[in-house]
Image: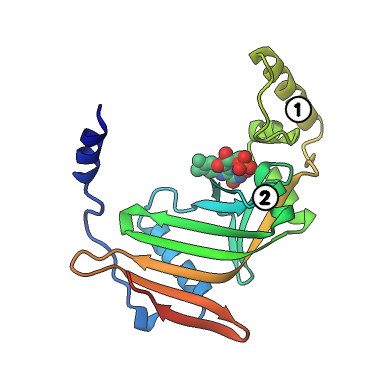
Amino acid sequence: MTDSSWRERLRALPVFSGQLPTFDTDAAPADPTSLLTEWLGFALDSGVSQPHAMAIATVSSEGAPSTRTLLLKDVTPEGLWFATLSSSPKGRDLVQNPRAALLLYWREQGRQIRVVGDVEPGSRELARIDFLKRHPNARAIAAGGQQSEPLPATDAEYESVVAAARERIDADPDYVPDEWQAYLVRPVEFEFWQAARERDQLRLRYRQDGNGWVRDLLWP
Ligand SMILES: Cc1cc2nc3c(=O)[nH]c(=O)nc-3n(C[C@H](O)[C@H](O)[C@H](O)COP(=O)(O)O)c2cc1C
């Protein structure tokens, strides 16, 4: 397939279809976390697929950006939570550069939420609670802390490493690797984006300003 036929096929795709929710920016709450939970609750109630899957971008000490999908684990007044291995590439980025950008995109509703914030590790107790809720196989795979390392040369080697970890977990169901970590993103900026069929998109940004949040509507 030539480049031009890809161009045609991509151009022909619809972006949004069906009924889109409205977004009354004048009625938006002063606290952006309230708006986030309002939108998240609506996404959940409307059956949006994987509304808790979010992209998270980190930047290495050399300034190299990278992004990947993670699950949103909680939203509290402090911010948004995710969990991963501190020994992973993103975990190492966060030691050097404890900032992240998050993106939630709900295509069924034409909604996007962007969040930028400072990242800090949560307590060991939160990491423990999160890890122990994972499926035993997921725990076994995470137990060695090798996320994103090259796999062993053969399937047999991989399976024996996972089987050994699974045995360890079966013998000690409370085992939590030191590297498993819950992280809190403390937001300093949010942007809520709503697609609209009859008019341009609506964008509402909140930026932290000492005592509270400053709101701006942005040019689409
Ligand atoms: C829908 C979805 C959810 C995911 N959730 C997590 C998660 O909660 N924690 C995690 O460590 N990786 C999760 N992953 C895998 C990450 O995207 C990524 O491959 C992995 O964390 C390694 O990232 P890194 O090499 O940048 O550190 C998920 C992937 C997808 C597609």
The amino acid pointed to by label 1 is Ala
Judging depth in this view, the residue of 102 and 162 nearest the camera is 102
Q: Residue at x 74, y 54 (%)?
A: 95
Question: Relative to 61, does residue 24 appear above or below in the rendering?
Answer: below
Q: Amino acid at mark 2?
A: Glu
Identify the residue under disc 2: 62
Residue on which the image places disc 1: 165
Check if mark 1's residue and mark 2's residue have beta carbons within 8 Å.
no
User: Splitting the image into 4 quarters, where does residue 19 fall?
Assistant: bottom left
Identify which residue is drawn at 71% across, 24% down. 162
Residue 34: give x, y in percent of width and height.
Answer: 50, 74
Q: Which mark is residue 175?
A: none
Residue count near mark 1 (Cα–Cα under 10 Å), binned few <14, some 14–19, many ≥20 = many
Q: Is residue 132 visible?
A: yes
In the rendered structure, the answer to whether residue 171 lies left or right of residue 24 reads right
Q: Is residue 129 visible?
A: no
Ligand 1 sits in quadrant: top right
The answer to whether residue 203 is above or below residue 155 is: below
Q: Residue at x 51, y 51 (%)?
A: 55
